[in-house]
Image: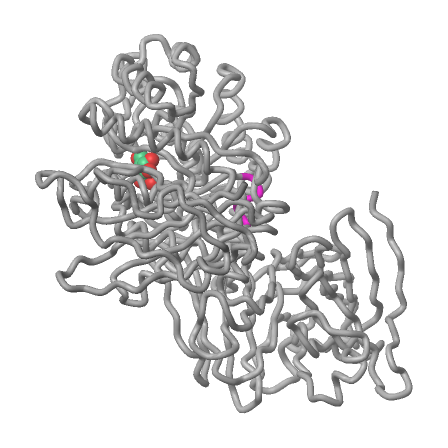
Amino acid sequence: MKRSITLIITLLAAASSAFAQVRVSTPNVEMVLKAEKGGDLQIRYFGGRLSDADVENIGAAGASHHSAYRAYGLSGASEASLGVTHADGNMSTSLKVESVDRTEEASAEVVRIRMKDTVYPFYVTVCYRAYKDVDMIETWTEIENQGKKPVTLTRFDSGSLPIRVGDVWMSHLHGTWAAEGRLVQEPLERGMMVIKNKDGSRNSHTDHSEVMFSLDGKPQENVGRVIGAALCYSGNYELRIDTRDTDYHEFYAGINPDNSAYILEPKEIFRTPELALTYSDEGLSGASRNFHRWGRKYKLAHGDRVRKILLNSWEGVYFNINEPGMDQMMADIASMGGELFVMDDGWFGVKYPRLTDNCALGDWVVDRNKLPNGIGWLVEQAHKHGIRFGIWIEPEMTNTTSELFEKHPDWVIKAPERDLVTGRGGTQLVLDLANPEVQDFLFSVVDDLMTENPEIDYIKWDANMPISNHGSQYLSKDRQSHLYIEYHRGFAKVCDRIRAKYPDLTIQACASGGGRANWGVLPWFDEFWVSDNTDALQRVYMQWGTSYFFPAIAMASHISATPNHTVFRTTSLKYRIDVAMSGRLGMEIQPKNMTDEEKALCRNAIAEYKDIRHVVQFGDIYRLVSPYDGHNMASLMYVEPDKSEAVFYWWKTETFYDDHLPRVKMAGLDPSKRYTVHELNRIDNVPLPYEGKSFSGSFLMENGLEIPVKHIVDYHKQDDWSSRVLYLTTE
Ligand code: GLA
């Protein structure tokens, strides 16, 4: 039950300062706002928790006067969070504080600051949710038109933050298909920096909507003050950092307003997506831990549930789905200790059998030529093998060659008067999720599958096409600019319905790989596919970047065949295992083509992963040496919150003779505890010299352990790959 307490602005130090201060705080993070009735709402401070006395004197120390939600039209060249064209054509808005309200939730406090335009019946409520047990403050706004006529919103950010100018560096993720999550780190200079997404349907292939700001110079993993921000939204977004002639970088984040002017009807409330803000004085890894703890507890579907080890059929057989083949893969993964088999693309289509990628999306009926006994038989077989069954769908899409499109040509996104713009296979189209009939159809795709086969345990939900032509055949001609926003409202409605009926189903967000790694998606999804690129070396880089904002439990990471199908690199199986084991372990390979020795290695890895997965999936991350720093190796570790166990990963990323790799200092351990070292996935003929030995946490954090640059294996087994996984346990 929510308890609502109306608070009439906390007046702190009324005598010495003329403004009313509102504190929004988590255990270690604090925001201080100035919210004087009739005045501008300002952010005075964002950082670590302050004492009452320091809050009282914050103005005297010199604090920001940044408008928490500046509206366009009366503040010159300043960047605005909100743009409104009122019914009479007035493009200016002037918002002044009316009230401050605090609401208690079970795990958080919500502060709502309501502002009103000085002339029009137009309101904006700036909201902050401060968690009691994790260091995250979510902010969003509710924009409300109480006038008699519609107004047009031309910008509608979720929130903003001032960041004091200094030696501030920004870390953010950039990429493309098969190269997602590439870390970019750069100093913030003067001028405007904009990161935006325009894909329409997915939003994390290219740039991500999350950033970190290191406040003390060049970013460091385990020391220094860091602000982290993540816009939780599945659609187009825009992040701006404006640095003009003031002492502050101004950070703004929200839905991308490009081609998205929004007509707000009388009495309608436009709720912007949440912007999650955190702060840590323990470096980038500290900010990551804050995102991971908050994400697992309050965002990610089933963030407290251990993930199963699976085999996905895609890279093993592609579209060559058939009954004996599926059965063989199920038997193989079961024999290696896996817990789930996922049948990927290629199982459906009657009039247009899905033999390749140019047809049948939307025709979610099993192809009996390939699978005469249907899905039910496969589910039963999986159970006979002692594993669970999962299946691939791509419900938001269709093809010109499909029965669905033949029946409902009006359901696809298409610009009026123009030819269709097609995607994958030369025939793919995006369904118009603004249309409630399309929403019902999407729900029925999952509902029908689950009704017929209630034992389906896992769904891989793919989305392989951007919105490539602007036009909704459902929205009226004066609402075409609502397309991007309505698409994602439709997506949310469908996902809500699915989750209401199937709360326990595991669902993966895949979108041509990592197109849907975003906290706005994950409340309905258990994990995401990091990338279609399964090359272990490139995965070290991609997973490193992705781990800035997302926990290992959500990062699907699979062992695949060599040469890799995307980059054609040949890595050792040991290396592929050691990389995949740092996320949610799975396999994406044809086991039939593996030797007995390879299978044995995987069987052992799966067994060992079961021993450590609680640490990987629920532990605290400490990144130690970045692959991006040019040391020819990378290393990170996960530590149990009570520091009783840890898993240390070390991957060589380049091989040169006479190369002297750094000795890696560990982090996050209890200095006074003694940790016993045990190597996992061992391939060497002799154990490491410290196998079974114990060391104090302080020794491991001050000195670390020497990691041999190569493996001691028989001559014919030598290669240029080297990696180690060490499991550290206490008594
Ligand atoms: C996308 C996904 C892949 C696979 C294929 C199937 O590319 O990212 O993992 O499912 O679709 O067509």
Asked whether 529 or 692 is in front, the reply is 692
Residue at position x 56%, y 49% in the image: 643
Left or right relative to 29: residue 53: right
**Colouring used for the render:** one colour
How many numbered marks does the figure carry? Answer: 0
Residue at left offset 62%, top offset 67%: 159
Position of 704 relative to 305 (above/below) = below
Residue 418: percent from the left, percent from the top?
34, 50
The answer to whether one can see residue 449 in this image is yes
Q: Quadrant of residue 396?
A: top left
Residue in the foreground of this view, choosing between 636 and 512: 636
On whether residue 68 falls in the magenta region, the answer is: no
718 vs 454, left or right, is left
Residue 69 horizontal/vertical position (percent): 67, 72
Give whichever of 375, 181 is nearer the camera: 181
Q: Is residue 32 above or below residue 309?
A: below
Q: Is residue 103 found left or right of 539 in the rendered image?
A: right
| Residue 523 among magenta residues | yes
Residue 535's spot in the image, x, y percent?
Answer: 25, 46
Q: Quadrant of the N terminus?
A: top right
Query: Ligand 1 lies in which image quarter?
Result: top left
Q: Nearer the viewer, residue 152 or 72?
A: 72
Q: Is residue 232 visible?
A: no
* Image quadrant in which the C terminus is located: top right
The single residue placed furthest to the left in the displayed view is 716
Residue at the spot 48% in from the left edge and 48% down from the top edge: 675
At x 31%, y 14%, the residue is 327
Q: Which residues are magenta?
A: 520-524
Q: Classify residue 323 as left or right of residue 154.
A: left
Most common secondary structure along the magenta stretch: loop
- What is the quadrant of residue 152 in the picture? bottom right
